[in-house]
Amino acid sequence: MSDDYLRFEGVTKQFGPVPVVAPTDLSIGRGEFVAFLGPSGCGKTTLMRMVGGLDTPTSGRILLEARPVGGPDRRRGMVFQSYSSFPWQTVAENIAFGMRYRDDMSPQEKTASVAHHLALIGLEAFADHYPNRISGGMRQRVAIARTLAAGSEVLLMDEPFGALDALTRERLQVELRRIQAHEAKTTIFVTHDVEEAVFLADRIVVFSQRPARVVAQVDVTAVLGVERSLDLRESRPFFDLRNDVLHLIRHETGDPQ
Amino acid sequence: MNPLFTFRGKPSTTVEILCGAGFALALIGVWEAASDLGWIAPTFLPSPSRVAVAGWGLLTKQHLLWHAGVSTLRVWVAFLIAAAMAVPIGILMSSYRIVGASLEPTIDFIRYLPVPALVPLSIIWFGIGEETKIFLLWLGTFFQLVLLVADDARRVPHEYVEIARTLGGSSRAVLTDVVFRAMGPTLVDNLRITLGWCWTYLILAEIIAADSGLGYVIWSARRFVKTPEVMAGVVVIGIIGLVTDQILRAFHRRLFRYL
């Protein structure tokens, strides 16, 4: 695992006079699942959007395989919390949209890929349903499948499960971890939910209040291992790690509460 | 529980249609009674039956269908020209802020000019032929429609655009594959509503300078105080409007099944 797959070098961001991201240096390895954890509105989403090319750093640079990232492209795919799937397309069409701008695949390959990704997210039976006829959890799975179908190497997820009920969220977390093990995509997962970050991530990067500054990094895999099942959530190590991270957040992020 | 009088309840479609037709028929019944009983002088409000007879007369002796066809054609020609211009320009105004910033003050200014005030100017420019009518209708709809289209496009969630960008879509591809598709339902709704405005300006145009069309029929009947004919002409416009609207609604339902 090369540590230099994705590098932040002194990255900052200012919106007008407001500093949103303080100088940030960070390395993410290929295939690593990193959670950006921090208070709401702290700037962690902005940092992730800069990886996607949807915002540009005010100073510093972001390197993907030693090359500075430019505007958005297929290598770095986004999954949002809401408006994640196109309402005018069926589940299968939404997934196919991920390959719409790929000219490296034949129509037959694209059809096969839609079937493959439908199976991966377990929605074969819903292929012809429109998003308003399926649950919020299913819509998020569609969005993930579409990004995978696009052949993205880096998955950028902005609180993708934030609007789901607790049970659905747990199920999707297990599923995302399974998909991640299968597809080995480098993932940045933005969340303010400590348990979610601990359960999903190989590593947690804890950010301060705005402007976002890295206050701690937690190697989750070293404690919990790579395999994550629902049982893990009730285990002692999970519980302890969760408490440690919560403690970090309370005392290190400068949260006024 | 009976859904008829439940707050925000949903009665069946059949019940809705029956209620709509029932109210219209009841209104016609009251009108007929008021005229037959002599409450209102027939010169002001002739009974529905007399209006129907007058309408039949117009239909058989005065080429009512031809006039209706001429009016409908004028409305659609002007409306299609306005829409064909407003849709791309409106989308560009929302997609490139500089286009919006450049055009919006001028459009806002023209939008507030009352169309009737521009009739004399239009006659000076185009004479009293078809050009004047098309111009007035276009004037009344284009400037309203272009702003509605720009707003529709602005309301497309930015997430859709960003998703398409990170899937490798170019600006142009995002415009046609995402923005245009996402705004489809509100766009068709706004087109349907502005088509209705076209009829308002059409009658104005046909009253002022025309020898054909429903406005002309109504206005000539007025000169001889043939109130039943005037009302028959108005009713025909209403019927055309009702039918057009229903067709466009059905089209909307077919096109946007996913709603």
Image (cartoon, rainbow, N blue to C red):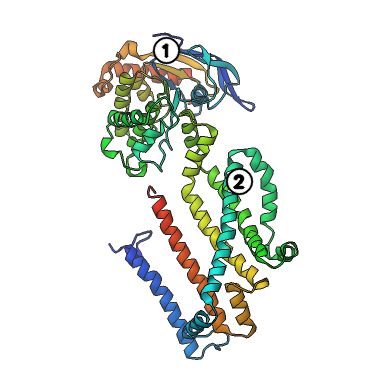
Q: Residue at x 57, y 44 (%)?
A: B91
Instruction: Give SS at disc 1.
Output: loop
Instruction: Give SS at disc 2.
Output: helix
Coordinates of residue B52 in the picture (x, y in percent)? 47, 82
Residue A164 disc label? none
**Mark 1 belongs to which subunit?**
A
Circles 1, 2 touching at the beta carbon (< 8 Å): no
Coordinates of residue A204 in the picture (x, y in percent)? 41, 17
Coordinates of residue B1 in the picture (x, y in percent)? 27, 62
- Which residue has dot 1 on it? A29
Residue A135 falls in image quadrant: top left
Give the camera-side residue of B82 and B190.
B82
- Which residue has dot 2 on it? B89
Q: Which residue is drawn at 69% across and 42% down?
A: B102
Disc 1 crowd rating (10 Å Cα; few below 14, some 14-19, many 20+) is some
Disc 2 crowd rating (10 Å Cα; few below 14, some 14-19, many 20+) is some
Residue A2 falls in image quadrant: top left
**Mark 2 belongs to which subunit?**
B
* Residue lying farthest to the top in this orientation: A2
Coordinates of residue A218 in the picture (x, y in percent)? 40, 14
**Three-letter code, disc 1:** Gly
Residue B41 falls in image quadrant: bottom right
Q: Residue at x 58, y 39 (%)?
A: B95
Q: Residue at x 41, y 77 (%)?
A: B25
Left or right: residue B130 versus residue B27 is right
- Please tell me whether residue B172 is drawn above or below residue B248 in the rendered image: above
Give the camera-side residue of A47 and A208.
A47
